[in-house]
Amino acid sequence: MANKIIRMSVLRQIIILKEKGFSNRAISRQLGLSRKTTNKYIGLANQSELTASELLQLTDEQLHGLVDTRSQKPPDDYLQVLYHHFCEVDKQLKRVGVTRLLLWQEYKQLHPQGVSYSRFCFHFRRWRQGQQVTMHFVHKAGDKVFVDFTGKKLAVVDRVTGEINQVKVFVAILGASQYTYVEAVTDQKVASFIGALVNAFIFFGGVPLAVVPDNLKAAVTQADRYEPLLNDIFRDFGNHYQTSILPTRAYKPRDKALVEGAVRIVYSRIFAPLRDQTFTSLADLNQAIGDALTPYNQIDFKGRSTSRFRLYEELDKPALQPLPARPYELKKYVKATVYKTSHVWLGEDKHYYSVPYRYMGKKVKIACTTYSDEL
């Protein structure tokens, strides 16, 4: 036992130093350990998927279980109960502030003879790996909506000329529930993109804390590995809805894995059933998409007794921020010079507009909407 306690003391030091930003080489040198031992302990700690603070809260017995690969397998009846319990664990982890440690403690209250915390985490990882629907990230309720356009297109036929017009398809998916919104739009430009996103918020009945678009030209003026530059309209949209805009990072495919997975399913559940139908207006096409979207959201996940809609009702819907009194109205940005009369000329509607006198003689950027009183 003494050796084990000493080893756990060393492991705690490794966790503390790693959290402070020390490299593996520096940690091994600081604690007088071999590189192999240091790498092993750090690897085992990372496999637990716990934060440094959560690891340090564990008792020596629990911490030892994380690095002890000789732990005995619990009886099969306990495993059956445990694995049946993991569906609820996976759902509860999406709630804000809920941790695996808390859920294990609740599990132990129900099953005092159940597995230790370390084995709970071990079997939970195995259970997740065996699921057909695998979440690489634990998305918190009401936290993010992921948006993108599908690569494939649908079509609308002009009823007069018979011309076939290809249209883009917008997809938005809430992270925790995977509740999905789909809409066909004429193009992928700013007006269509923002309009579809406004409709998605109305469909969800609330606003998530962040919008995660791919590096769309409609949303991002310059793709950057660390901090993409947002266009003025999208930034103004975020301010209107009090939500953050977090474009996916270049060369980080896992940032957009959720929406790309949704796009693949949309192809089979929405595109395929509509493939032999002819639509003469965008409204008719979107009506058909909506009709197909309802069962898509209500069907149970494969291997799980819950659906996107039920998870949305339980998780995302209560956590979303309320919608503003008015939906966002698209603005156009123009540059102008303020005359000495303290006015600017707006060529969009051929009118002069007054501005504060302190801007006289300066170049300004003007945001204008369809309502001149909001200039």
Image (tube, rainbow, N blue to C red):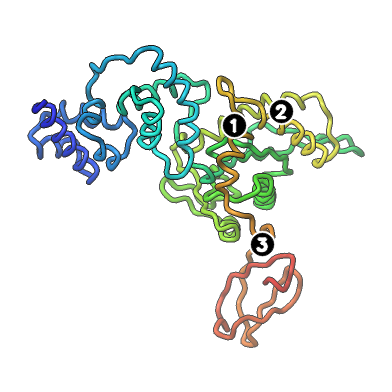
Which mark is drawn over residue 262?
1
Q: Which of 254 and 294 is in front in this view?
A: 294
The mark closer to the camera, 3 or 1, is 1
- Taking depth in this image into account, of 99 and 255 the one nearest to the observer is 99
Q: Quadrant of residue 216?
A: top right
What SS does tag 1 mark? helix
Q: Is residue 77 left or right of residue 222?
A: left
Measuring 45% from the left and 35% from the top, which residue is drawn there?
137
Q: Do the CB atoms of the residues marked 1 and 2 lie less than 8 Å apart?
A: no
Residue drawn 60% across the image and 44% down it:
317
- Find the distance from the CA under tag 2 to the CA under tag 3: 32 Å
The amino acid type, in three-letter code, at marker 1 is Ala
Q: Give the mark, 2 or 3, whose residue is nearer the N terminus.
A: 2
Residue 182 horizontal/vertical position (percent): 68, 38
Q: Residue 331, labelled with which disc?
A: 3
Marks 1 and 2, how far apart at CA = 12 Å
